[in-house]
Image (cartoon, rainbow, N blue to C red):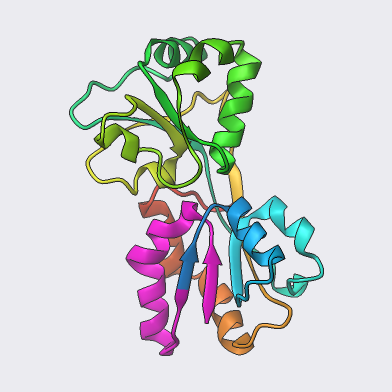
Amino acid sequence: MKIFSTLAVKKALDDVIIDAFKQETGGTVEPVFDPTNQLLRRIHAGEPFDVLIGVSDSFRALSRIINARTLTTVARTGVGVAVAPGRPKPDISTTKGFIETVLGARSVAYSRTGASGIYFAALLAKLGIAEEVNPRATLLEKGFVAETLIDGRADLAVQQLSELLFVPNVEVVGPLPADLQHYTDFSAAIHARAEAHSEAEAFVAFLTSPVAKRAYLQTLLELPA
């Protein structure tokens, strides 16, 4: 069974969910992880899959590809900030503190194609600081932006909280201030012509099990509102 999954839930799947599903059902899982936008490109290029886990809004463009009956909301996450290991955690609890932190950073890292990066780019423009921040920003096409803290390319990383957690040793400062926060919901669904249809249905159902819910919470995801 081939699973296309967004990066935001990778740690929950890798650490807990996939192994627990295999132990319970004896099924096989071949995960493919990428930002949702990248997964959509692969799907539209004809790459096969059995289950897609992605940003909930993205399923609107897949009405002819997925089995709508199986569409299931599984988790959500907000955007957060991380700093390099051992660095003091700045105060980002208020909009003022967040803006000062971003403006004071040598370089802020974020993703061009990830949901959090797209939101953060728009937020910089909304706050009127894009022209100051972007010339020295570290932009990644995809992946875990907190890796730039380890190799020194940036001293501040902005990404979904669950993705920041995936890079060992970085200091997760916390979520954006409440008035700037942006939540992304994630859903799962089966390909309308999935080869492993019954196994895929079982996997989607497992994504809302108590085991899966605990895994989400342990990896800075939240349960659906």
The image quadrant that residue 50 belongs to is bottom right
Tell whether position 147 is magenta: no
Instruction: Report whether 68 appears left or right of 24.
Output: right
Q: Please, is residue 45 above or below residue 119 in the view?
A: below
Residue 92, how many percent across, how many down? 41, 19
Between 5 and 220, the one lying in front of the other is 5
Q: Which residues are magenta?
A: 1-30
Residue farthest to the right? Answer: 64
Residue 122, how many percent across, how many down? 64, 26
The image quadrant that residue 91 belongs to is top left
Residue 176, how many percent across, how many down? 48, 27
Report whether residue 94 is seen: no
Instruction: Report whether 69 appears left or right of 155.
Output: right
User: What residue do we see at 52% from left, 19% from top?
Assistant: 134
Between 41 and 58, the one lying in front of the other is 41
Q: Please, is residue 222 above or below residue 40 in the view?
A: above
Report whether residue 74 is seen: yes
Residue farthest to the left? Answer: 86
The image quadrant that residue 62 belongs to is bottom right
Q: Please, is residue 98 above or below residue 217 in the view?
A: above
Instruction: Report whether 175 appears left or right of 35.
Output: left
Tell whether position 6 is magenta: yes
User: What residue do we see at 46% from left, 61% from top?
Assistant: 213
Residue 143, how many percent across, how many down? 44, 47
User: What residue do we see at 58% from left, 81% from top?
Assistant: 200
User: What residue do we see at 37% from left, 76% from top?
Assistant: 20
Q: Please, is residue 210 above or below residue 153 in the view?
A: below
Number of numbered labels in the structure image:
0
Instruction: Report whether 207 appears left or right of 24.
Output: right
Could you tell me what secondary structure mostly forms the magenta stretch? helix
